[in-house]
Image: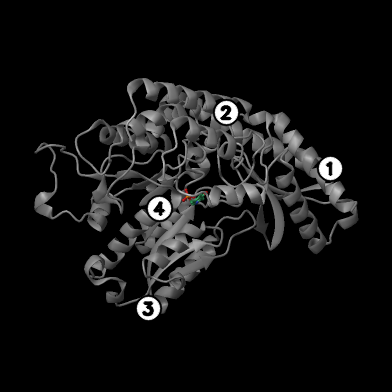
Amino acid sequence: MQLSKDEFRRLGYMAVDMASSYLAELSVRPVFRQMEERERQSLMNMPLPVTPLSGDEILRVIAEQILPHPMGNGHPRFFGWVNSPPAMMAVVTEILAAAMNPSCAGGDHAAIYLEHCAVRWLMQLIGFPIEGSAGLLVSGGSAASLTALAAARHRALGQLGIDVRAKGVSGAPVELRLYASTHVHSCIQKAVELFGLGSECIRWIEVDEDFQISLDGLRQAIQEDLRQGRRPFCIAGSAGSVQTGAIDPLNELADIASEFGLWLHVDGAYGAVAMLDPGTRPLLAGIERANSVVLDPHKWLSVPVECGCVLVRDGELLRNAFSLVPSYLRTEPGKGIGNLPWFAEYGFQQTRGFRALKLWVTLAHAGSSGLEQQIAGQIALARYLEQRIEAMPDFELRSKGKLSIVCFRYVPEALAGDDNALDALNKKLMERVQAGGTAFLTSATLAGRFALRACILHYGTAEGDIDAMLEIVRSTALQVMNQ
Ligand SMILES: *Cc1c(COP(=O)(O)O)cnc(C)c1O
């Protein structure tokens, strides 16, 4: 486990050289290359060496077997899912986080204060109230929603006189109901399943033609549940859905939540940081009224994976939902060492990694002006992609989100109107584009139909990459059709 200082430096410099070459050469390599079966097996089935491998041997295995097979998200023509390239300055400093190796459960060391700082910066960037709120870093949006919804459940059952931590949900005298559109991310369902509430506690609300939650549908569902003696407790809205980037009307959701006494949870894992773009900010108005907001710095902000963040307006409530420190042992401001309460009291994890360093580095290195420029630029690129699609008769736009996701399909004249044939063609061409390594797209199912989906998150993507991607889609479609 130990290296001499000189050996550490020698191997460290080799690793830095490998990383810098890797990053510099990414854009001239294929976006993605399927692994051969032999390569997969050789990684999966590698035996644990009995005699130690040397540092040089380990770096050689990484160079030969691991670095050549990235997921693809480092490449400027990667438009899949919601995965960004890493902010390079944060790659550089990850070695320092690992060298310090603190547990950020809590205590009186720099990593703790840096996490408080970086989380406050995120609150500021999205206009979330700071006083009285709590926030912490977690693995990602899923863990962040799980954390926030635990607080929502704690409050809802507390209002019914039930201590959910002692009695569990089986103590609830009525069925709880959570409301979300059919386009909300699956992590909401996973969370309520894990809470023992059962997925049937979710009332799925239809979306309108812009893929935003139907407010009439929401109101009707709440009223119907109340009539039937159920207990509505939470609305989970999207600030940027994963399929189309749709933003639910957050002010209206906040109005309905306060009218009925519900918790408003906003999943901004992907889109909350669009608050940085002055042109887009008004579309997210109301986010500051949410009881909880989730954002994922490892998505649009390019913080190296994993880095998610949960913000809860009533910080004390979040603490009450998780803290297992007897009240007489709780830290109090101004007393003892580490006067701040432990992060471990606000979530499920005890030992917690030094995620704050890469987040702080990324934000500081870009500055708020740099972040704004990046987000606004990528939103503008998505509008450019839309315009290009609308100008071409053999392409059809399938969603008009306001963020950096565009859904579309290829519609050759011969197949116009034949939705089944278009589904088959577009699915096949997507698979072929992915395997071809010149661009990477994924898909979304919209109105029951297959759509190609491009999510623009890479700091290096330019208009030329958008043009090239469209050309690749067209030529691949022609190949598929001519077979
Ligand atoms: C990615 C994403 C999630 C899940 O976050 P993870 O970081 O993958 O756990 C939730 N909601 C939305 C809108 C997302 O884009």
Q: Which mark is residue 23?
A: 2
Residue located farthest toward the bottom when viewing the structure as drawn: 228
Q: Which residue is mark 4?
A: 143
Indicate the position of residue 123 as horizontal and vertical percent values. Answer: 37, 38
Q: Nearer the viewer, residue 61 or 131?
A: 61
Residue identified by numbered label 3: 229
Whether residue 54 sits left or right of residue 131 in the image: it is right
- Residue 341 lies, with reference to residue 92, above or below; the image says below
Identify the secondary structure beneath mark 2: helix
Give the CA separation, mark 1 to mark 4: 41 Å
Q: Position of residue 420 (x, y in %)?
A: 79, 63
Q: Decide which of 436, 318 is in the foreground and name it.
A: 436
Q: Quick check: can you spot residue 461? A: no
SS for tag 3? loop
The reply to whether the residue tagged 4 has its Cβ within 8 angstroms of ligand 1 is yes
Verify CB contact (< 8 Å) between mark 2 and mark 4: no
> In the structure shown, which secondary structural element does the residue marked by tag 1 occupy?
helix
